[in-house]
Amino acid sequence: MRHRSIENFLRAALVAIVAIAAGPAFAVDFTIVNNDSTNEGFNDDTAATPVGGNTGTTVGEQRLIAFQYAADLWGARIDSDIDIVVNASFDALNCNAFGAVLGQAGPARVNRDFSGALEPSTWYAASLANSLAGTNLEAGQAEITAMFNSELGQIGCLTGTFFYYGLDGNDAGNIDFVTVLTHELGHGLGFLSFVNGSTGQLFNGLTDAYSNFLEDHSNQQELFPDMTDAERQAAAIDGTQTTSDLHWTGALAIAEGEDLTDGRHPTGHIEMYAPNPFESGSSVSHWAKSLSPNALMEPAFTSSLHNVELDVALLEDTGYPSIFPCGDANQDGNRTATDALIALNTAVGLGSCIETSCDVNSSGTTTSTDALIILNVSVGLDVDVSCGLA
């Protein structure tokens, strides 16, 4: 995209040392547990033609490949020694001719007051709790539960609009399944409030790691833990479909959101979704629709989007102890010429690197341009990076 005058030199120099650069391992491994029955959902044996980098030859196989790809988008960025298990299925979810619940997911369990917890008397999503504890707090149990709409595209359920199972985001007017998967996994990782938004009551009387950063700007800038139930109830509807006085106050997300052209308050705080009336399953636990550019964790599908930059910063605010930066292809915590080499090898077909690590210009594909950008960053040049299809 830029600096083409030295791009060919970079390609020649890095290909010459291809043998020393290994492809990246994922910083945290996701295990997808298929809970569907024979010939349904992830086991659907209907023949399918490979599409958009998805090599599956049945619908079920393509769904599983897309799911693992989406999990790896997160897995390349979150550093944890504890694997994350996801129970997954296709089921009939709410839908009609005009709209549909595409998927729903959340932590399979929550934990508090464990060794390593950042705050006492605070609930943490299971995967975050495990990461902070450095051990699986409930071995043998899943960390995330996720389900997806088995009726999408059928008559009466957004008729004729189906999931697109390619990995490249070229959905051609359908709904990119990777985007939906990545979004729902974000909720499972902890992008959600455990507060009852309809009543304002804390979950079992205690706050949670996400809600600690929610502020009602029109109510003396109070944070959720300091509010009464009635104040939290009011904060959850202190907005519209397009703007909100419910804000995210975490410093890392605020820093990442500096390039937002809308949905960002003059304080730097980022607007959250808080329409009136309250929308169960959507309100409070998403960015506001006002954000521009669009963010993955907004409440409605807008387009194919695999970029997790703002969302992973929010998760780091909630307590994830280590997030690898965009461009850190080998997940060693630094962006070096070795990372540029991995990206270049990917670009010429001699290696592989997931887009949330190597597609640093958010084009949807890792190219030699991405390798050049990473190399520029590694030598201290001030270059913008943002990973994954945007």
Image: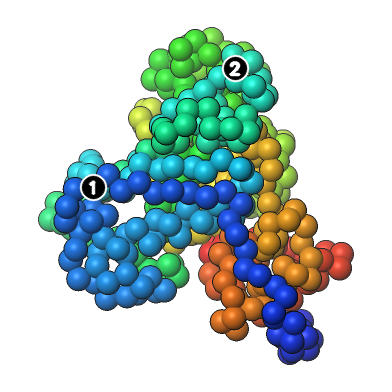
Query: Which of the 4 quarters of the picture holds residue 39?
Result: bottom left
341 lies left or right of 355? right
Query: Hey, what amino acid is under mark 2?
Result: Asp
Above or below residue 327? Residue 112 is above
Residue at the spot 24% in from the left edge and 67% down from the top edge: 58
Above or below residue 350? Residue 76 is above
Q: Say which quadrant the N terminus sits in.
A: bottom right
343 lies left or right of 291? right
Q: Position of residue 118 (x, y in %)?
A: 67, 24
Q: Position of residue 24 (x, y in %)?
A: 62, 63
Above or below residue 331? Residue 12 is below
Q: Which residue is mark 2?
A: 113
Q: Position of residue 388 (x, y in %)?
A: 57, 62
Q: Which residue is mark 1?
A: 36
Mark 2 lies on a secondary structure that is loop
Q: Nearer the viewer, residue 270 or 359?
A: 359
Colour theme: rainbow
